[in-house]
Image (cartoon, helix red, strand yellow):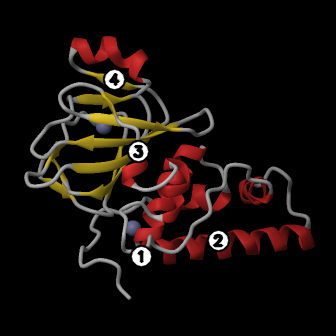
């Protein structure tokens, strides 16, 4: 059964899928990747390709004892004891908006989330993950903008409900935006429905306006 009529247009990068497969991403990124994959047939298929490739490399390395500083061998070894792996499960049952990997972190579905206001009507809930990157749920009221900001690292934003616009692009349910250092943006939630997102960052965001910048250490974003 197709879970949604919604067509996903914005996908994970190969680098993220490979990192997930090799077990080299921080836990917060693993969570976003696993949640997107549980919603997206295309990325799930691509990830299985990388998984198969990684498995082959591991077998080869056992038989042929490849050079120990080969990148692929290193990845294969890291892969063996990846502590932060987030298991991918089948899509969520129809009575919720959080796919299984996310429900485990949120302690349930949307109604279990303890929101905290972070200004401008936007609320967030920080999810507990290992150091190196942080993950949070964001609720942006319909028609509201998130304060404009740049990024010191990589920011992944996955839409779970509603949609947001970033310049000309629309990000609907299941879509993922990958923002990096050279990107400054002001995402705006679409009218009609609050936008719920899962976001992960591997470095503090750089807010353009003074007040959000002062509040940043307290908000832990
Ligand atoms: Zn995808
Ligand atoms: Zn951003």
> SS at mark 1?
helix
Mark 2 is surrounded, within 10 Å at the Cα level, by few (under 14), some (14 to 19) or many (20 or more) other residues, namely some
- The residue at 53%/44% (across/down) is 28
Q: Is label 4 or label 3 in front?
A: 3
Q: Position of residue 209 (x, y in %)?
A: 21, 17
Instruction: For the C terminus, give its image quadrant.
Output: top left
* Quarter assignment of residue 186: top left
The answer for how far apart the CA atoms under marks 2 and 4 are is 35 Å
Tell me if the residue at label 4 has its CB under 8 Å from ligand 2.
no
The answer for how far apart the CA atoms under marks 3 and 2 are is 33 Å
> SS at mark 2?
helix
- Name which of mark 4 and mark 3 comes first in the sequence: 3
Picture quarter with ligand 1: bottom left
Nearer-the-camera pick, 138 or 177: 138
Instruction: Provide the residue designation for mark 3.
Output: 113
Tell me if the residue at label 3 has its CB under 8 Å from ligand 2.
no
Instruction: Provide the residue designation for mark 4.
Output: 206
- Name which of mark 1 and mark 4 comes first in the sequence: 1
Which circle marks residue 42 in the picture? 1
> SS at mark 3?
loop
- Name which of mark 3 and mark 1 comes first in the sequence: 1
Tell me if the residue at label 1 has its CB under 8 Å from ligand 1.
yes
Instruction: Provide the residue designation for mark 2.
Output: 51
Q: Position of residue 71 (x, y in %)?
A: 72, 54
The answer for how far apart the CA atoms under marks 2 and 1 are is 14 Å
- Name which of mark 2 and mark 4 comes first in the sequence: 2
Mark 3 is surrounded, within 10 Å at the Cα level, by few (under 14), some (14 to 19) or many (20 or more) other residues, namely some
The answer for how far apart the CA atoms under marks 4 and 3 are is 26 Å
Q: Are marks 3 and 2 in contact (CB under 8 Å)?
A: no
């Amino acid at each position: 059964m197709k879970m949604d009529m919604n067509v996903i247009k914005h996908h994970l990068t190969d680098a993220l899928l490979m990192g997930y497969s090799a077990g080299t991403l921080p836990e917060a990124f693993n969570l976003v990747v696993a949640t997107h994959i549980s919603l997206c047939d295309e990325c799930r298929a691509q990830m299985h390709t990388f998984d198969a490739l990684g498995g082959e490399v591991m077998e080869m390395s056992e038989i042929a004892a490849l050079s120990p500083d080969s990148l692929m061998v290193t990845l294969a070894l890291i892969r063996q004891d990846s502590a932060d792996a987030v298991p991918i499960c089948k899509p969520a049952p129809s009575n919720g908006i959080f796919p299984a990997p996310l429900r485990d972190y949120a302690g349930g579905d949307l109604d279990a989330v303890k929101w905290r206001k972070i200004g401008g009507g936007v609320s967030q809930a920080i999810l507990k993950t290992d150091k190196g990157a942080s993950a949070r749920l964001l609720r942006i009221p319909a028609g509201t903008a998130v304060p404009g900001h740049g990024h010191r690292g990589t920011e992944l934003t996955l839409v779970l409900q509603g949609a947001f616009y970033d310049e000309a692009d629309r990000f609907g349910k299941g879509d993922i935006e990958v923002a990096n250092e050279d990107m400054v943006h002001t995402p705006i939630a679409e009218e009609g429905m609050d936008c719920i997102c899962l976001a992960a960052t591997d470095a503090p965001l750089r807010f353009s306006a003074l007040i959000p910048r002062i509040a940043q250490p307290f908000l832990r974003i």
